[in-house]
Image (cartoon, rainbow, N blue to C red):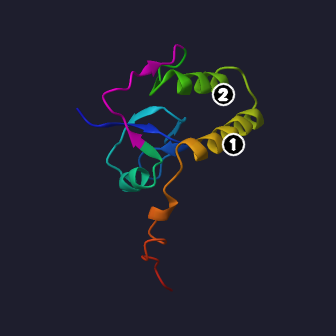
Amino acid sequence: MSELYAATRMFDYGPPNTPGETLDPGQIVELGGWLNDDKLIRLNLVKKIDGRSKPCQCGKCGKQFAAEFFLSGHGNKRHRGLTAKEQLDVSIAEDKKMDTVMPLHLDKTAATRGRRKRA
């Protein structure tokens, strides 16, 4: 069985040149071996699920989440009939909260590690 990860932010994930699936924070995903998977891990956009996690499943869409907290946020955003603007506002608030709880590792980008390509 492949390793499972939980998204730490909302982002689209899937094969290159496809729309992909929009992952919500805490949503469990099996990485597909795409080109940027290592970057997602390094930058903390996904976090490996450990054995202590007890996944929860959404009763409406069947998606799996790392904890009840994330499932609740998903339900409030996706299944309450919010407008696109309201969903965006909720996503921005989630990102701000996640910045304090689980910050991105922006110090581990290629540019900050001295690998910037010069023109």
Above or below, comparing residue 85 to residue 79 in the picture: below
Which mark is on residue 34?
Answer: none
The range drawn in magenta is 47-59
Amino acid identity at mark 2: Lys
Which mark is on residue 92?
Answer: 1
Measure the C-alpha gap from mark 1 to mark 2.
Answer: 11 Å
What residue is pinned by disc 2? 77
Left or right of 116, for residue 83 = right
Foreground residue among 87 and 109: 109
Counting other residues with Cα less than 10 Å from the Cα at mark 1, is it few (<14), some (14-19), or many (20 or more)?
A: some
Percent x, y of residue 8? 51, 41
Question: Residue at the location (71% across, 39% down)?
Answer: 88
Amino acid identity at mark 1: Ile
Return the residue found at the far top. 59
Q: Main secondary structure of the magenta part?
A: loop
**Does 49 lie within the magenta span?**
yes
